[in-house]
Each structure stands twice: as C-alpha cells, then as structure tokens.
Image: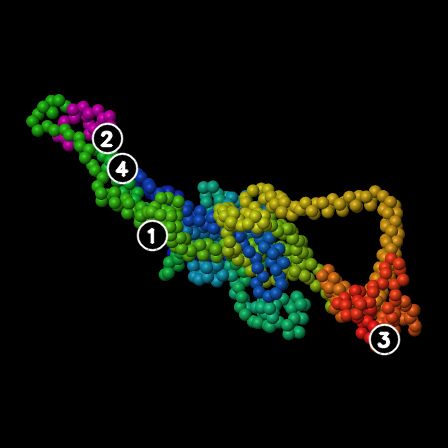
C-alpha cells in the first residue's frame, strides 16, 4: 500500500458518522458519570445540590452477570464427511486449553460491556510476542482505537476493505520493534513532522538511506501533525492497518467439498488435476495484508501471518441504526429517563432544605449574604435591627412551607419504571424486589427479560464463535503436518485418552506412507456447547440430580452416585468418584471366601510343589481303584439281578397262582413297567431240562394227563390215621373220603 492510498483511507475515516462521542457519553452514564461540568455549574449557581440515582449501571451489570452465568464452552466437530472425530476431539482439547490460558472468556466478557452499553466491542486474537507467556492471547480493545470500513455489510467484516487501529507509544519502544527504522522513529519522536528541519545533518550525507527516502513524504503529507505526534510527551501514534486485495485465483475443488488454492510448486496439485480428481475453478478471492505506519512513513507491509481470512479483531455488535449503520446499545433509550430521575431527586433535596424569608429592607443588622448563609442553617442566629423593627410596617418572617406534592413524587416513580420499560430489564432480573406478588409471576418476568435479551446474546455468541475460529486456525497452523501426540485428560467419569495427530504409517495395500488423523485434510467447525459450563449451572444440575437420586431404589443409587459426585465443585472430585466406584465393586462374602480359598491353595502350591505332586499321584491311584471297584459292583449287581430274576421265574413256574399276587404287591410298592420293555439278557438254554419230582399236571415240558387221576397215597404214619371213607358225605377238600371228590377223573 502506498502513501496515496493510505491518505485516502484516512480521509474516508474522517468522513464517517461521528458516533464515538455519543458512545463515550453513554458509557460514562454506565460508569455513574452522569452530570457534566455545565450542569454542575448551573446547579451551583441556583443553589441546588447535585444528585445522581444510578439506574443504568445496575441494569447493565445484571445483563453482564447473566452472560457470565450462561457462558458455554467451545466445541470442535468434523465439518462433514466420515471420520475425523479423533482429530476434532484433539483440537477441541487444545482449543479449550487455549480458551483458559489466553483469557478468552475474560476478553469476551469485557467486550460484552460496551456491546450492551454503546453497541460495539472488540477482541484482538493474536500471538503473544513474549516467548515466556502462552503463545496465544485474547485482549479486549477499546472502541476509540479502531476504525473500519463503514460500507461493510457482513457482521464479521469479511467484506470490509480495511480496519485501522491506532495506539500511542514511546519512540524508544517503537525503535526496538522496528530496528531497521530506528533513526527515523527517534527523529520523529524528537521533532514530529519537522524532523528533517530540526536535524539537517541527516540530509547532508551523514544519514542513513532510509531517512532520505522518507524526506519527501514528510514534507508533502497534508494530514495534521497532531494526529500522529504528541509534542508534550513525544509519543508517536502507531497505525496498524489491515486491508484486503481482491485478486484472481485458480482453485481446486475436491469431491468432498474441500477447496484449496492451486500451487504450482506442489506436485500433488498437478497430479490431482492430471488424474481428474479435482475440479478446476477460476474465481476472485480476497487476500489479507498488514502494514504499519507512523504518520506518512510506512514501516512494514506484508501478507497476514495467519491462515484464516479474518482481520484479527472480532467485533461484538449490539444494535445498528437502519439508515446510518451506527451501533448503539441499551443506554441510548435510558439516558433521558435517567436525566429526568436525577433532576427530580435534586429538586426534591433542594425543596426539602429551602427556606423563604420575607422581610422589609433594613430589618436585619447584617448583610444580605450573611443572612442567606445563616438562614439555611438549622442553628441560624439572626440579628434584627430593633430601631427599624419598631417602625410601623416593619416585618421579618421565615417560612419553611415547601411540601413534596404527589405529582412530584409520581414523576420520580415514573422515571424509575420507565427505565425498566425501555430497557426490558426488570427489577426481578436485577435481583431486586419488583412488582411481582408470587413466585410464578417473578419467574415470568425474568423469562420475559431473558427473551428480550436473546437478540443481543445471539450477537455475542457470533462474536465469541469468531474468536474461537481464529484461535483454532492458529492452533492448526502451528501444529502443521508434524506428528503430535495429544493427551486428552478425562474427567471424574471418563479416563484419559491419547490421540496421535499426523501419524505416519505404511498402507498395507499400496505399501506407501500415509498420514492417519491428517490435520490439514480434516474439515473442522467451531460451535458453542448447548449446555452452560458455569459453576452456578453445575450447582443447579447437582440439586436436580440429588432430588432424582433420592427417589431411586438403593441398588440404582449406588450406580448413580459417581455421576452425582462428578457435578460437585471439590478439588478431590476424581478421587471421590473412584472411591465410590470401588465401594460399589466390593465382593460378596461368598466371593471373599472363594478368593481366600484360592489364595490359600495358591500359597500351598507355592510352598510345597513336591507334596502336591505326591498327593496328586495318590489321588490318581485311588481313583483307579475306585473305578475298578465300581465296575466289579456293577457286575455283581447284574449277576444278583439275573439270579433274582431266575428265582422269580422258577417260583412263578412252580406256582403260577402267585404271579397275580406278586403283580399286585409290586404295583402297591410303586413299580411301573419300563417303556418299551426290558432288555433280553439272552441266557443260553439247554436242549433237555433236568428231571423234577413234580408229577402231572406240573411235569416240566409235559401237559396234564388226560382223564387220569393220580392215585391217592395212603398215609402210613401212625400219628395220622387215615380218614374213613363215607359216601355221600358233605365234606369237601381234604375232608372228603377220596381225592376223586375234588379231582375230575379220579377213581372213586
């Protein structure tokens, strides 16, 4: 950028709407400075004591407290496509660390104050120049230091042509920052724009070439010297000018939507175009540049050191006028009512202390000034002239009849309530007692205030997201394509996790080196968490969780206790959660007993391996003997069963009439015939059976003798004489005379 273009930008800034004076006045009202010098002088001349009842400051502090209580953290997510979650988690951890160490929350909170007050706040996101400090910093910038392109339409100034920041610094400090222009800076700090007249020896061949080059600029520049040189303390105004250049460019669009600028020195770009993997696009893009100026002297001009396309200053917008685009905040609509309230209070205080005197001239033996000072005192001592008071018509009366009228009091009440009406910030929202008569009405008024603030809070979230995007761009730029290990610290519930960024591995298919978790190819997006992370919100969560856990059964309470403890703000939170989990995993008495037995067995085994081996050998031999005994018992049982079966069969064969009786006895004992019948032992049978002493009809293998009865064997025992035969006797069975009485076919 040349001097002519820089001068045009300076002239354009001078023609912008003069809104900063009014914005500064509005912020003075927020600080309590609500009475200017002219008003105080007029009040003093009228004898009215000044009074201020600040209503603007508490209202804005309530809004600022609301922002602090609802503050959320940044969250990094993959912006489309599959994969990349590990990279997003690692960058999210680094970004949250940068949020704490760079004091981003404090900077955004300080920018929120002028946003809601006068309509615009600024936050600078840059690298720290001190190597001993954290590499990134977020600093709130006063609105008087920054001017921007007034024709810009985008809220993030992405279409702005320039942004200028001015800061007054001592020449010796500037000389250390720009050592190549040291002589020029020190000369300007000594004589201002006339440095070339104060030190003619510098132009007579004894000066450096750099000073001679800027001599014509100092003589020909028409901008007033007092805008960049302070003759009182010799400070110089350093101008940091960020501007954009729109240039044609060739872009490459990949299939996943990523767009990069074509680089002829990159062989991968040429290979992608040759293979048709990307689409070639011609477009006009904006290039951001930065330059430093002291008056008409340019100290530096070069490309931006950042990879993002923003100016490193994030705006926090309040409201903007429709016609002029002038920013403004809540104070604009509250100033008139605040002035009305202040004047009413001052008038009341003056009226309560005012005294009216009605006297004839010469009634007092003192001057008029002495009388006015004395009459206003509660212990006034008024000396009257007795000779004059003895004259007819002489009069001296003191009257204190000023009364506060209902109209005057109502005017003050209306001024107080009007401030709430125009700002939508109720007394309940400020933590004061308002017009609500019930808890439901109080919550309703607070919710209405929250709803009225949603537009302002949306603008604040947009500005804070822009700060997070610029921080993430610097983190990604510094990590580059080098392998980087990120240890994501867990909380009370999750364990630590390690993610390796840009890990170099060999592709098993192509046997070529590849990068896993490639940071430069992952599209990331910065957003804000939906859940606040403030201590007050965690306290509310703790109370709600406590009430829910109380209603759970005992076994569920033990499972929920670690989650409840994770919401506590105690330094030993992680230890508490681990202790709760360990207590929930304690062994039952049976498990303890089993573990003791196992440990005892292990100890015995370790104490005597030989004894254990001998014991195992003895058990093995004992087991073999027991197996043989079981087999012998099985054979014995089978033989006994077969023998019993044979005996039973013989008994049934000898006496068939016992079979039904045996069946009834067995059924009474619970015997049931096996399903499918038994198994045939298939005993061998001889061809000829042994002779039996049983005669017919029970001769084995023969049928009964047909129509032949066996002869009756006569009893020859002397102890049992035979029964005499009597025909026609009614005797039966053994009482009959002959067997023929009972057996068919037997001889008579």
- Answer whether residue 400 is magenta in the image: no
Instruction: Note whether 405 is above or below 712 in the view shown.
Output: above
Query: Residue 29's x, y, as percent?
Result: 37, 45
Seen in the image, is 20 located left or right of residue 544? left
Of mark 3 and mark 4, the one earlier in the sequence is 4
Q: Quadrant of the C terminus?
A: bottom right
Q: Which residue is the extreme one toward the left?
A: 392
In this view, the residue in front, 203 or 96, is: 96
Instruction: Give the number of the mark in front: 3 or 4.
Output: 3
- SS assignment for the magenta stretch, majority: loop
Q: Which mark is residue 422?
A: 1
- Which mark sits nearer the N-terminus, 2 or 3? 2
Residue 477: horizontal and vertical position, in percent?
Answer: 61, 57
- Can residue 577 be seen here? The reply is yes
Left or right, 743 with reference to 183: right
**CA gap, disc 4 to disc 2?**
13 Å
Which one is in front, 444 or 528? 444
Examine the image and state in which quarter residue 652 appears.
bottom right
Q: Earlier in the sequence, mark 1 or mark 4?
A: 4
In the rendering, at what x and y percent does residue 279 appear?
A: 60, 72
Marks 2 and 1, how far apart at CA: 40 Å
Could you tell me which residue is drawn at 44 percent across and 54 percent down? 457
Residue 292 horizontal side relative to residue 85, left or right: left
């Amino acid at each position: 950028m040349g001097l002519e273009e820089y001068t045009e930008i300076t002239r354009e800034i001078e023609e912008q709407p003069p809104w900063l004076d009014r914005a500064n006045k509005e912020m003075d009202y927020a600080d309590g400075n609500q009475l200017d010098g002219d008003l105080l002088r007029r009040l003093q001349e009228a004898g009215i004591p000044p009074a201020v009842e600040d209503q603007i400051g508490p209202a804005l502090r309530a809004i600022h407290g609301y922002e602090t209580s609802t503050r959320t953290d940044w969250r990094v997510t993959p912006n489309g496509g599959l994969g990349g979650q590990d990279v997003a988690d690692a960058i999210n951890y680094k970004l949250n660390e940068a949020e704490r160490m760079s004091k981003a929350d404090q900077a955004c909170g300080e920018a929120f104050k002028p946003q809601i007050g006068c309509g615009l706040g600024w936050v600078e996101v840059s690298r720290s120049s001190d190597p001993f400090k954290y590499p990134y910093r977020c600093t709130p910038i006063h609105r008087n230091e920054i001017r921007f392109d007034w024709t810009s339409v985008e809220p993030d100034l992405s279409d702005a042509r320039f942004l200028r920041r001015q800061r007054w610094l001592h020449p010796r400090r500037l000389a250390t920052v720009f050592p190549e222009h040291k002589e020029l800076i020190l000369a300007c700090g000594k004589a201002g724009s006339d440095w070339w007249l104060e030190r003619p020896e510098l132009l007579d061949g004894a000066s450096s070439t750099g000073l001679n080059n800027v001599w014509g600029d100092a003589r020909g520049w028409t901008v007033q010297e007092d805008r960049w040189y302070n003759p009182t303390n010799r400070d110089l105004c350093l101008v940091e000018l960020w501007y954009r250049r729109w240039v044609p460019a060739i872009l490459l669009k990949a299939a996943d939507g990523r767009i990069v600028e074509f680089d002829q020195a990159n062989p991968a770009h040429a290979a992608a175009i040759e293979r048709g993997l990307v689409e070639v696009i011609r477009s006009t893009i904006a290039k951001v540049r930065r330059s430093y100026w002291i008056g008409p002297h340019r100290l530096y001009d070069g490309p931006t050191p950042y990879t993002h396309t923003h100016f490193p200053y994030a705006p926090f917008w309040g409201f903007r006028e429709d016609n002029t685009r002038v920013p403004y905040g809540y104070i604009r609509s509250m100033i008139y009512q605040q002035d009305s309230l202040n004047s009413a209070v001052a008038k009341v205080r003056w009226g309560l202390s005012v005294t009216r005197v009605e006297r004839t001239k010469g009634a007092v033996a003192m001057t008029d000034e002495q009388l006015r000072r004395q009459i206003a005192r509660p212990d006034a001592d008024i000396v009257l002239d007795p000779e004059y008071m003895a004259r007819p018509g002489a009069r001296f009366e003191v009257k204190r009849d000023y009364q506060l009228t209902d109209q005057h009091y109502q005017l003050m009440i209306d001024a107080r309530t009007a401030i709430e009406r125009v700002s939508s910030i109720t007394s309940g929202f400020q933590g004061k007692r308002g017009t609500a008569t019930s808890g439901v009405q109080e919550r309703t008024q607070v919710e209405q205030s929250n709803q009225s603030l949603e537009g302002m809070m949306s603008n604040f979230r947009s500005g804070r997201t822009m700060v997070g995007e610029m921080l993430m761009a610097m983190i990604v730029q510094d990590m580059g394509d080098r392998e980087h290990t990120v240890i994501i610290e867990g909380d009370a519930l999750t364990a630590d996790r390690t993610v390796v960024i840009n890990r170099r591995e060999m592709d098993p298919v192509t046997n070529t080196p590849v990068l896993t978790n490639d940071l430069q190819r992952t599209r990331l997006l910065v957003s804000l968490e939906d859940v606040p992370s403030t201590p007050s919100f965690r306290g509310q969560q703790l109370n709600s969780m406590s009430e829910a856990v109380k209603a759970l059964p005992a076994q569920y309470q033990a499972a929920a206790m670690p989650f409840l403890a994770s919401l506590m703000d105690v330094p030993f939170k992680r230890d508490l959660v681990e202790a709760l989990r360990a207590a929930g995993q304690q062994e039952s008495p049976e498990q303890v007993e089993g573990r003791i037995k196992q440990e005892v067995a292990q100890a015995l085994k370790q104490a005597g391996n030989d004894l254990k081996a001998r014991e195992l050998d003895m058990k093995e031999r004992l087991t073999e003997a027991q197996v043989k005994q079981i087999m012998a018992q099985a054979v014995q049982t089978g033989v006994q069963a077969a023998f019993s079966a044979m005996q039973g069969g013989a008994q049934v064969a000898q006496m068939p009439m016992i079979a039904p009786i045996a069946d009834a006895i067995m059924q009474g004992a619970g015997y049931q015939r096996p399903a499918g019948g038994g198994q045939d032992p298939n005993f061998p049978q001889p061809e000829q059976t042994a002779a039996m002493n049983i005669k017919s009809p029970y001769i084995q293998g023969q049928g009964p003798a047909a129509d032949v009865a066996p002869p009756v064997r006569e009893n020859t025992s002397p102890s049992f004489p035979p029964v005499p035969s009597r025909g026609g006797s009614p005797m039966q069975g053994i009482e009959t005379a002959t067997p023929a009485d009972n057996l068919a076919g037997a001889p008579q």
